[in-house]
Structure formats: structure tokens, C-alpha cells
């Protein structure tokens, strides 16, 4: 479903850090100015062309919204498609106590109250109207993402433990896109990671290094040389549970990862799994001795 988001730039941080990621993660095609507008054509023309593609219109209402001629223009065009608010084409989101204009108030439409966006029920109402679902309560989903960011920014390794049918991939996609994190991205479901040598190649490629990887056991010295030259790096390993099925990795690889995470402090690890990190491998495995903070994200009951 295509969802057009109309908002005042006074609400841009909330829209971009909370609303837009949830809609996109749930599967909506979000039509929004910074992603859709290009240099050159008139702003109003681009706004109209983008808005005309939408199946749903979310109006993020605030005092600044009603004071903006651009926002008013988008609001009028949206309401013209559903003047009596009977078809659920226009979804009203309140972000402050601003009085509603007559063209809205006269119909007494249902609105989503996100003046306080910590309860789940208003989020669930909004996402359901857009035909999207995160699989977890929205506040929990956002909290898990923010906690992972906070820990990685402090160079603390993290285990993101996800249970149930939660859409967690978009969280990591967002982190990988953050320039400040510089997060290298490796998925253990990638067939290229099945062997130890293949995993090392994928890790180094994700870190921006393309170098021949010798056959074991010389692959680990080459891995160490590159990591030391790069300096501090952050690495996400998606589907980390797969290590249980990878006997080729061997204890030496895990010892090398532990060395660079704990001793040299040159590698910060984000491991996504369904089983807690500490339970994936025997206690005497070197990687079990890595200190990680656990962030849990559970499916909606």
C-alpha cells in the first residue's frame, strides 16, 4: 500500500525517526518529501504528483501544520478525496493540542492520538489502517532499535534476540544506513558464508577490503592483519544461530573474533539471533566469553 505522509517540518524528527521507519518496516511504500522530491521542478507540482499516487494519506496534525500553506494544500487535497472521512483514505494523527479546522471538526472524524506515542494501541490502530504489521508492539520495536543504536554508539557489542514473527530485518537495515555507525553487514544465510574462509571473505568485503583469502590455517593470520590495519570496526552478523550448523568455522575462528572484540577492542559485534548468544555455543567456546549486552524483541502476544 502507498502511504503519503503530510507533516510540518517541526515534526520532521518524529516522522523520520519513528513514524516512517514503522510504516516502511511493516511493508508500506511511504511517499514522503525527502525521499521523493528532486531538484528542479516546482515544489507544489512535486507534492501533488507524489500525493496523487497514494492509497492512504496520513496527516500529522500540529499547530505548525495548520500554520503552513504547504501543509494546508496537502490537507485540502487529501480531504477532497474523502470529504466525510467515511472511506478511511485520510488518517489523522494528532501530535499536539491544536484546534482542528472546521472542515475536519464538522465531521467529527476518528483520529489517532499520538501526542504521547508510548502506548501501543494508537500505533496499532494507525498501522492497521495502512495495512501494515510489525509483528511486535510498536513501542517495543522502536525501543529495541534505539537501544541497539545507543549501545553500538558506545562501542558495546550487542545481541539482538528476536522471537516470533517480528519484522526485525528493517531495524538492521536502518542501522546499516546510518553513516555514523559504519556498520558492516554479513548474513549467515548467505551461502558464501558456509565455510570459514567464505565467512572471512564476506566480513572483509563488508568492511570494504577485497583481498585474496588463503586456505586454512593461513586465512586467520590474513584476517587478523586486515582487521588490525582497519582499526575499530562495527560488524553485524544476521542469523547468528547458524553457527550451530557450521562445524567448519572451528574454535580458532571464534577465538580470533573474541580476541578482536575483547582484547584488542577493534571489533564491535551486533549478533542477531533467536537464541540468546550465551546459549548458542558451549561455555568453553571462546566466543561464549565475549561480553555482549542483550536486547530482546518479542512478537505481539
Image (cartoon, helix red, strand yellow):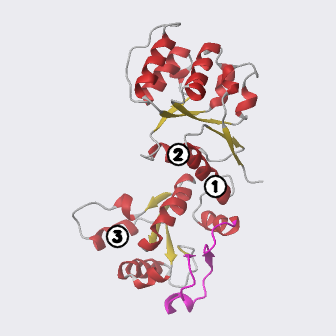
Q: Image point 51% across, 74% down: which residue?
A: 60
Quadrant hosting residue 152 = top right
Query: Is residue 102 one of those drawn in magenta?
Result: yes
Q: Image point 51% across, 66% down: which residue?
A: 14
Expressed as whole percent of the image width and height from the top left, the position of residue 55 reads 48, 66
Q: Which mark is residue 47?
A: 3
Rendered position, 163 above or below 86 = above
Q: Which residues are magenta?
A: 93-119
Query: Is residue 32 one of those drawn in magenta?
Result: no
Disc 3/disc 2 C-alpha distance (Å): 36 Å
Tell me the crowding category of disc 3: few under 14, some 14 to 19, or many 20 or more residues within 10 angstroms, Cα based.
many
Q: Image point 66% across, 36% down: which residue?
A: 292
Tell me the crowding category of disc 1: few under 14, some 14 to 19, or many 20 or more residues within 10 angstroms, Cα based.
some
Disc 3/disc 1 C-alpha distance (Å): 32 Å
Q: Which mark is residue 153?
A: 2
- The residue to which callout 1 is attached is 143
Amino acid at each position: 500500500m502507498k502511504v503519503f505522509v503530510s507533516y510540518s517540518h517541526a515534526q520532521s524528527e518524529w516522522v523520520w525517526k519513528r513514524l516512517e521507519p514503522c510504516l516502511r518496516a511493516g511493508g508500506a511504500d511511504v511517499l514522503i518529501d525527502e525521499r521523493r522530491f528532486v531538484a528542479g521542478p516546482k515544489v507544489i507540482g512535486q507534492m501533488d504528483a507524489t500525493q496523487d499516487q497514494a492509497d492512504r494519506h496520513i496527516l500529522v496534525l500540529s499547530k505548525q501544520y495548520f500554520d503552513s500553506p504547504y501543509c494546508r494544500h496537502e490537507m485540502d487535497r487529501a480531504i477532497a478525496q474523502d470529504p466525510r472521512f467515511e472511506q478511511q483514505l485520510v488518517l489523522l494523527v494528532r501530535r499536539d493540542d491544536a484546534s482542528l479546522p472546521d472542515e475536519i471538526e464538522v465531521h467529527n472524524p476518528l483520529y489517532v492520538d499520538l501526542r504521547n506515542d508510548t502506548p501501543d494501541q494508537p500505533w496499532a490502530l494507525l498501522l492497521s489502517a495502512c495495512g501494515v504489521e510489525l509483528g511486535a508492539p510498536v513501542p517495543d520495536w522502536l525501543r529495541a532499535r534505539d537501544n541497539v543504536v545507543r549501545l553500538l554508539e558506545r562501542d558495546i557489542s550487542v545481541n539482538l534476540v528476536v522471537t516470533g514473527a517480528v519484522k526485525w530485518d528493517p531495524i538492521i537495515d536502518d542501522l546499516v544506513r546510518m553513516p555514523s555507525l559504519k556498520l558492516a553487514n554479513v548474513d549467515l544465510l548467505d551461502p558464501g558464508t558456509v565455510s570459514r574462509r567464505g565467512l572471512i571473505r564476506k566480513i572483509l568485503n563488508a568492511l570494504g577490503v577485497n583481498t585474496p583469502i588463503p586456505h586454512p590455517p593461513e586465512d586467520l593470520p590474513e584476517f587478523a592483519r586486515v582487521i588490525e590495519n582497519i582499526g575499530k570496526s562495527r560488524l553485524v552478523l544476521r542469523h547468528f544461530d547458524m553457527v550451530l550448523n557450521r562445524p567448519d568455522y572451528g574454535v580458532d575462528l571464534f577465538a580470533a573474533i573474541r580476541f578482536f572484540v575483547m582484547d584488542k577492542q577493534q571489533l564491535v559485534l551486533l549478533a542477531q539471533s533467536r537464541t540468546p548468544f550465551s546459549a548458542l555455543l558451549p561455555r568453553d567456546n571462546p566466543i561464549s566469553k565475549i561480553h555482549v549486552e542483550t536486547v530482546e524483541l518479542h512478537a505481539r502476544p
